[in-house]
Amino acid sequence: MKELNSETLPDRRADDVLYNVSQMPGFPQNTQVSRAGLLETAEHFLKDRIQRGDTQACFLLGQLCFEEGWYKDALLHFEKVKDEDFQALYQAGVMYYDGLGTEEDQRRGVEYMKRIIGSSSHRAKHLKYAAAYNVGRACYEGCGMRHSDEEAERWWLVAADNGNPKASVKAQSVLGMFYSRPPNKNLQKAFFWHSEACGNGSVQSQAALGVMYFYGLGIKRNLHCALECLKEAAERGSVYAQGHLVSYYYHRKLYSKATQLAKKIVQYDNTELLGSAEDCLPVSTTKGIAMANFYLARCLHLGLGIKPDTTAAKHHYRMASCIDADVTGDLQCDVIYGRI
């Protein structure tokens, strides 16, 4: 079963490929053109360069299609130059593994990643950490390879490279999650890897650190650090952090703050889009929304920081259960035992 995201192509600039292509020498300049017109111009421009033998233009056209969601065309362009362009090979591997523009073929996706890892070319060097992360993902999920936590851990440790900021930050963050769960639970290791990933820019790990500080998991409890991590991760778009921030406010009896934030969170409806925006797992996003619904229901039920409304409370209890039954069950147990 898949639960992790693929590692995105390393070293892509923050600007989208359309902008980058439009800045290339010889690109027709027209400041009045619409985005649709600019896309058409970029396609013609790149196809002309391809006809003149420019393999990099073929990759760029594939990447342009990929970023626009035209996956079948993207895969076609990547496949044409995958033997000469390792970035195209990488993207094609991701697409086969995740079934983007084609039927899922995890074995081929893993094969492409292993070709990158095994290459001695300097042009493949910057892709090897990301490729190792993806092979570890395949081992963990048992897709394209035999399931093995041990092999997944081994590949992710290679990809994480002792916290190297130029390595796979996603691997560092995933190791934090890997060591947070049975049967591989080791909270000290989890804290270490989330700290490394957070220091290298991971929003997912910054939110996880906030939770670890809040509950004293793998580290001495520190409410100041918890609030700092959760607030910053929440501001950067982590719904998981936002949900735990609602919990933090509730437990500190800041009920008005808890309800105000929860009311914003319960309006979210596209968890995959929300997660991908900051490269957070959709499952973490749904947990944050479920928590917000439960705590909002609790406040409505008891009239904490908001006018009591039994009907609305029942609605949000039900929504919490529908979104994530496990989270809701755990919170209900907290209510039974007087922890909430």
Image (spheres, rainbow, N blue to C red):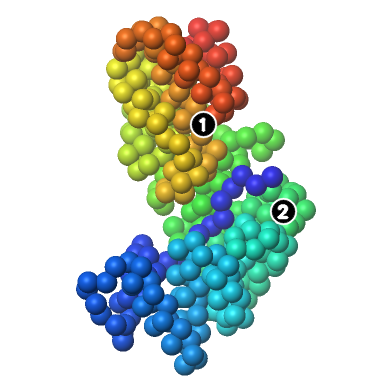
Q: Which quarter of the figure is the N terminus placed in?
A: top right
Q: Secondary structure at mark 2?
A: loop
When asked about the image quadrant of residue 89, the answer is bottom right
Residue at figure coordinates x 46%, y 46% from the top left: 273
Residue at figure coordinates x 32%, y 39% from the top left: 235
**Disc on res. 287:** 1
Q: Is residue 110 visible?
A: no
Question: In this image, 166 relative to 102: left or right?
Answer: left
Question: In this image, 328 relative to 265: left or right?
Answer: right
| Residue highlighted by disc 2 | 143
Please tell me how crowded label 1 is: few (under 14), some (14-19), or many (20+) other residues with Cα within 10 Å.
Answer: many
Residue at figure coordinates x 36%, y 78% from the top left: 41
Considering only vertical position in the picture, is 248 above or below 88? above
Question: In this image, 113 relative to 267: left or right?
Answer: right
Q: Amino acid at mark 1?
A: Lys
Q: Secondary structure at mark 1?
A: helix
Q: Please state the horizontal and vertical placement of residue 158, each as a whole percent of the image.
A: 60, 58
- Please state the total of marks drawn on the protein image: 2
